[in-house]
Amino acid sequence: MTLKTMLVTGASRGIGAQVALLAGRSGYRVGVNYLRSDAAANAVVQQIRDAGGQAMALQADVGQRDQVRRMFAELDAAWGALDVLVNNAGILANFRVDDVDDDNVEAVFRANVFSSFFCAREAVRRMSTAHGGKGGVIINMGSVASRLGGLGGGAAYAASKGAIDSFNLALAKEVGPEGIRVNALRPGLISTDIHDVHGGIAKMQLMAKTAVPLGRAGDSAEVADVVLWLAGDTSSYVHGTLIDVAGGR
């Protein structure tokens, strides 16, 4: 049986790392993309290999189109066809609108929005039946910040995730007829170190006790479970949708 290949961007830590690990345990060959965290990415790869799976680390700034092209070329050379793209890479930000400058707002949109466009472009060129592909799955990582406005200082982040909501729907309509299913997750308060810019995990978990109807923060593994469901055949008629993984928030 030919193994399916999944590329997870921003997979050296947090939600991305959990998605990569679960995918490896579920029989996927996994491309583990990272920006700077070489040791962390290779640790994820090694865990997958130690469990009998196949994985490779792929360094690239996915907000830069040329680096995205190089990353996909490396994946092509190693494994050929891509079956699943998980657009997970992204950053939080903490600055008020009256403090916005070109650099900080561009950094957020490059990491959170441009990356999804650049990676989806390369994936569609490989998956789409219009390009000779056999179809595939694209999963975009949004956030409930798109409808809640985010935390204080989070306007840029919330706006970038609002863009992902719209991008997800538009892309689904565009490539659904070409054999590609497209969906998005919107996590809420999840216990990862991405929250360091807002005071860290402990502060976030304390807030979750009153802000989340389930009374707790989520775990990255709970998000990964939904990603793997969307990637698989049991979600074959789920397309163009947004799934909140937010404990009712």
Image (cartoon, rainbow, N blue to C red):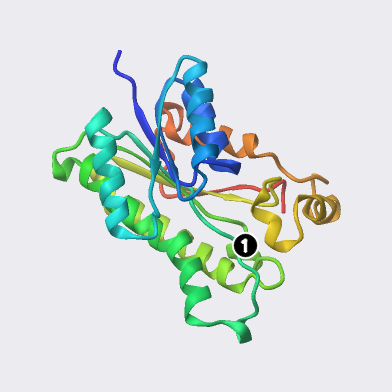
7 left or right, relative to 156 = left
At horizontal 58% and vertical 42% (from top left) the residue drawn is 13
At horizontal 60% and vertical 43% (from top left) the residue drawn is 14
At horizontal 46% and vertical 72% (from top left) the residue drawn is 106
Determine whether the residue tagged by mark 1 lies in a helix, strand or loop: helix
At horizontal 51% and vertical 67% (from top left) the residue drawn is 108
Pinpoint residue 22: horizontal percent, then vertical percent.
Answer: 53, 27
- Is the residue 29 above or below the residue 70 in the image? above
Specify few, some or many for label 1: CA neighbours under 10 Å numbering under 14, 14-19, or 20 or more: many
174 left or right, relative to 189 = left
167 left or right, relative to 65 = right
Residue underneath mark 1: 145
User: Does residue 166 appear in the picture of this structure?
Assistant: no
Examine the image and state in which quarter residue 151 appears.
Answer: bottom right
Examine the image and state in which quarter residue 218 appears.
Answer: top right
Pinpoint residue 12: horizontal percent, then vertical percent.
Answer: 53, 41
Towards the viewer: 10 or 241: 10
80 left or right, relative to 102 = left
Looking at the rendered image, the quarter that the C terminus falls into is bottom right
Pinpoint residue 122: horizontal percent, then vertical percent.
Answer: 26, 49
Q: Which residue is most to the bottom?
A: 98
Q: Amino acid at mark 1?
A: Ala
User: Does residue 144 appear in the picture of this structure?
Assistant: yes
